[in-house]
Image: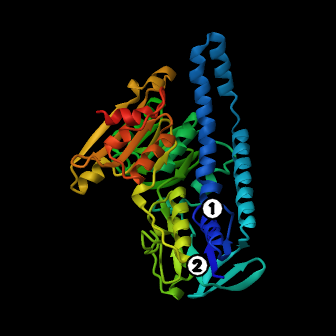
Amino acid sequence: MKQIVVIGGGPAGYPAALKAAALGAQVTLIEKKHLGGVCLNCGCIPSKSFLDAAHRFQTVLSSAELGGEEAQQIAQNLFAARDFNKVKARQQAATQKLQQGISLLLKKAHVTVINGEASFVDNHTLSVRNDGGEQKLTFDGAILATGSEAFYPSPFDRWKGQIYDNANFFNIEKLPGSIAVIGGGVIGCEMADFLQAFGVEVNIVEMQPQLLPQEDENAVRVLTQAFIKRGIKIRTGVSAADVRKTENGFEITLSDGQILQTQAILAAIGRTIDLTALHLEHIGVAWTRKGVPVNPRTMQLTDNVYAAGDVTGLLQLAHAATRQGEVAAINLCGGAAEYHNERVPRAIYTSPEIASVGLSRAQAQSRGMEIKAHKSFFLANGRAVAQGQTEGYAEWISDIHTNQLLGASVVGAHATELIHVAAVALEAHLTTEQLRQVVFAHPTFAESLTEALAR
């Protein structure tokens, strides 16, 4: 029986362990903190719980428009009475429940879980340290799934511990009156959305020309306009030149000379990798803060060591990590599986939502492809109009010569659910004509995906 060790119990590690166990391996999983990793404990799940609370309160306010003055007053009173402590309690209960679920799955699969910090001794030996001391484990194969941590560049590095990042934000005791969100990526935008809905004055500082630099500029424009309408201040094309502590919080000097006063700072500038403690030099692997040089299809790192998740530097998404972990486990156990980065959907849970999969218009054009864009606005969608959720659109990119679908993006209500229709279409290599043969129920938001192809 093959002896496999998985280092890291996050969304890459524990699915890898389960897959390897299902394939007949004897599996040991080593996790130095909590099962579920960043995603479950201080990332995907806590942030979605917070965002759901924010969006529910926003729904209450908008629904009051359907009633008279009394209904509107009730809605205002409910909004004013929102309790952040109860929001936190619900989030913590959800995290705990999911942690217990992971533990149960691993137990049923007969995966041995060790709490401790691992380091490589050689190509077939690990040292694991914890409060109980040190033990040595021998293995036939290993999967590296140690994740990433918040990045603190200058000048924020000297204030680490006094400003927030995703690791400590969800333990916040009381929301500040104002906050500067440094970084307009996914984490920054989602947290700005939540914080503004709970009455915090929010400034987003993003050094790139737009929020969400990796997303289509048209999709970002819709979100940007929604944020501005809600009172979120957005400063793009600037960075922080200096940060100093003040009596009431912090003073940030921006690169254009503007001075920003704020009670708190949330660092959402990106993620970094630190593999020092693993001693990868003992197995001949070099690494950088961006990750390890993994094979992007097979997840192989050395003859008997594979990697999955953020540590690969491929795509910092939990569902991407899960697929990578499963591919690594299959290949390590003698099977044949491939991971395809371009087929992984991207989802941003702001209001409005943004989701995409495959190539964007800019990516396709950068590869010299001749493309056609197909777009349908929710303003023309029956269900969207009936429900008053007309903000947004669905768009496809196809090859102008073959009609092959290359990518899609959806902005607006339910975008993070609708995008999976596009993901399936890309996985099946469908053309525009083939997808148009699929019958969609009416009235649904999903109809916009086929309606777009008629344009």
Mark 1 is on which residue type?
A: Gly
Residue farthest to the right, as pictured: 132
Q: Which residue is more in the foreground, 314 or 178?
A: 314
Percent x, y for residue 300?
47, 76
Q: Vertical placement of 230 versus 215: above or below?
A: above
Percent x, y for residue 144?
56, 74
Mark 2 is on which residue type?
A: Ala
Please give the residue where the numbered disc 2 appears in the rendered image.
142
Q: Is residue 93 left or right of residue 438?
A: right
Q: Which residue is more in the foreground, 22 or 411?
A: 22
- Residue at 39%, 57% in the rendered image: 342
Q: Which residue is more in the foreground, 11 or 57?
A: 11
Q: Which residue is more in the foreground, 330 or 136?
A: 330
Percent x, y for residue 189?
48, 44
- Residue at 74%, 52% in the rendered image: 97
Quadrant of the snapshot with the N terminus: bottom right
Quadrant of the snapshot with the C terminus: top left
Q: Is residue 159 left or right of residue 233?
A: right
Query: Can residue 184 be seen in the rendering of this structure?
Result: no
Find numbered disc 2 in the image and state the secondary structure of the residue it sits on: strand
Q: Quadrant of residue 313?
A: bottom left
Q: Quadrant of residue 79?
A: top right
